[in-house]
Image (cartoon, helix red, strand yellow):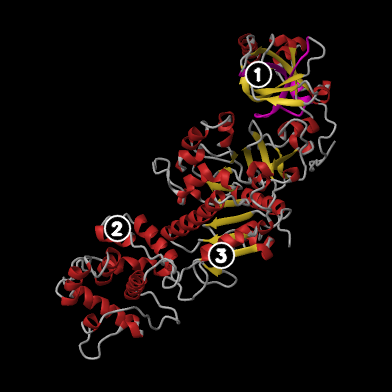
Amino acid sequence: MTTFKENIKKTVGVDLFRDAKKEEQFVGRPFYIDYGRAYLLVADSWKNKVGGLPQGTFLLAFYENTEGISEAILLRALGPTKLPTDSDVISSMIEYYKDNLKTAGEKSQLDQFTRYQFSFSGLECRVLGTFYQDANGSVVFGADLENFYSSHHYSVYKPTSNVLEAIVNYKEKDEIPGQENDVKIGHVRYSSSLRFQQSHDMVPTYITSKDFLGKRTALFGMTRTGKSNTIKKIVQASYDLGSKGKNLDDAIDASDLGAFSPFGEGGVPKYGVGQIIFDINGEYANANLQDEGTAIFEMYKKDTIRYSVIEKPDFEVLKVNFYTEIETALALTAERLRTGNEKADYVNNFLAVSLEAPEPEEADRSARVRFARKVAAYQCCLYRAGFKPPEGLKKIKFEGNAALNSLAREENPIDPSKGITLQEATDWFASVWGHYEDNPYIVDYRKEHGHEWADEDLKALLVFLTRTKTPGGNPNVSGYIKLKPLLPLHTDKSDEPFDEVIIERLREGKIVIIDLSQGDPDVQRLYSERICRKIFMDAMDRFVRTKPNNFIQFYFEEAHNLFPKKDDQDLSQIYNRIAKEGAKLNLGLVYATQEVSSISSSILKNTQNWFIAHLNNEDELKELRKYYDFADFAEGLTRFSANTDKGFVRMKTYSNPFVVPVQIDQFKVKKN
């Protein structure tokens, strides 16, 4: 008897049409077959001989009437079905029960013929497709049935381990599983109960680099069913494959069309694979006691960069210097205010302000003067909202006017051209706005120049700064107070913007973990959307400029907290765009959640890889039945043993035409 150990033997030399037709693996004959279903006659002795027929078992039906036909119909066992003779058998059983006669065991009081009749039952199977030999002698799989004959011409067998390995890992004709671009993800597992299975060799299952790199992958299941472990296995596989690629900076000239092929020889990624994990629960970025320390950062310390929304040892701070990183800060501000459904006109005017610096060679002096004023007014808004200025910003400088400098202080006027403090600048702008309609200089400026002294952007900033919508009025709007919720996102340290650093690291093939476990939901969504949009736009920019993109994989735990809801009709959101357009940009998406029904249908419809663990309600199963052949497993997905079923999933990958029941391997730390 073989032990319950991993069988890593490759399927070299497997002859599907010879090795699968072993007498000891015979399980029955069909009594009905069509394009979608087959009904088999099976016997207890046959089932026991092959080690049982759990729900989901793969079977092969061979046509045996004519020599030379190399064809096998692939079936999946679904459940019992009635035989035409069942009513007679049931009647006989009841009579024996009434007479209190033993009908089973060594002391059975049934005659031999009756025991034989009672041992037969019916089994319903789904037709998954056909294995056949093409004109070149290669084994090919077609995901349907081209023709079928009378059912009595077929015999059905349960595949042996080596044949089953070839079936579940079938990719393309003549392709052998376990090659350089393949990653072992687990082994075939049919059922929660393992009485028969534990005496057989494990049959390994593989996923290829082309399955998950640049593809959309979903992991659905209740908490503690192994979703995180599966994600870690994919991260591990992506890193190992990416380490074989070269640096993107060493890419050949993009004018060579070969540069755009993301895979090199043997399906290995051509460049390093960047990975970014949005870690809502902190289990990837921090030591996880529940999973015996299997945090990703422990495995790849040299190539992992961790970010946090708060300052922690060994973490980069996921914050922005709002005073110096102006464009990034304004984008975060805009996202936060839009998330809060702000609809006031003055807020929309503020969000429309452009603080993009004019090009030095193109801008005239007046453009540079106006830009400096706008930046100063924006920094004053931050100052009044309580944002701590960096050490290097003790004074700011912009051009004023003698007629305006004395408005705030008649004695010792404030002259911004000589450098003034933020408080003095705030007073200067407030006094100008307070006298904007009656100051002679500003009134005459309109007449002499044909436009106002302050453009629309500056006026929008002054409204925010003074909280007055009209010059000289009393505060009547929230203004800069609306910026206060953004205070946790600010740092007074002057560093390179975090999103630009993240992109650089991803292009180098590093792993970036964004620890959002200590952020409120709004902050989580804000950072997630901002970073995703920045990466997406960078990839799109490289694409349109004919520069190759390396693979970048996005990972989202608790995706229902970040992704658009099912009924959300806004398909322009960044997650929808990654799902729909990411493939051409080599952007992969891996997301996990307990709620299939909560995910936008736009994302679900573009998902190519599915890992389904235990789900506990009909609403989720109803949504799942819409995709592929998961309806075959709906009943079993609601059953779960906390002690034995962690990591037991039904897996559908991009390259595999049918669902395979798999036990995912446990992620283990390898010190790097």
* Residue position marked by numbered label 3 in the rendering: 501
Callout 1: SS: loop
Mark 3: which amino acid? Val
Q: Residue at x 49, y 69 (%)?
A: 310
- Expressed as whole percent of the image width and height from the top left, the position of residue 232 reads 64, 52
**Distance CA(mark 1)–CA(mark 3):** 53 Å
Question: From the viewer's perspective, is 402 left or right of 645?
Answer: left
Q: Which residues are magenta?
A: 36-65
- Image vertical order of residue 103 relative to residue 487, above or below: above
Mark 2: which amino acid? Asn
Q: Residue at x 61, y 42 (%)?
A: 641
Q: Is residue 667 visible?
A: no
Mark nearest the camera among 2 and 1 is 2
Of residues 466 and 446, which is closer to you in this image? 446
Callout 2: SS: helix
Dot 2, how many residues are within 10 Å of its Cα: few (below 14), some (14-19), or many (20+)?
Answer: some
**Distance CA(mark 2)–CA(mark 1):** 60 Å
Dot 3, how many residues are within 10 Å of its Cα: few (below 14), some (14-19), or many (20+)?
Answer: few
Q: Answer with the quarter of the image where residue 614 lies.
A: top right
- Expressed as whole percent of the image width and height from the top left, the position of residue 172 reads 72, 32
* Residue position marked by numbered label 2 in the rendering: 348
Q: Answer with the quarter of the image where residue 607 lies.
A: top right
* Residue position marked by numbered label 1 in the rendering: 145
Which comes before the other along the chain, label 2 or label 1?
Answer: 1
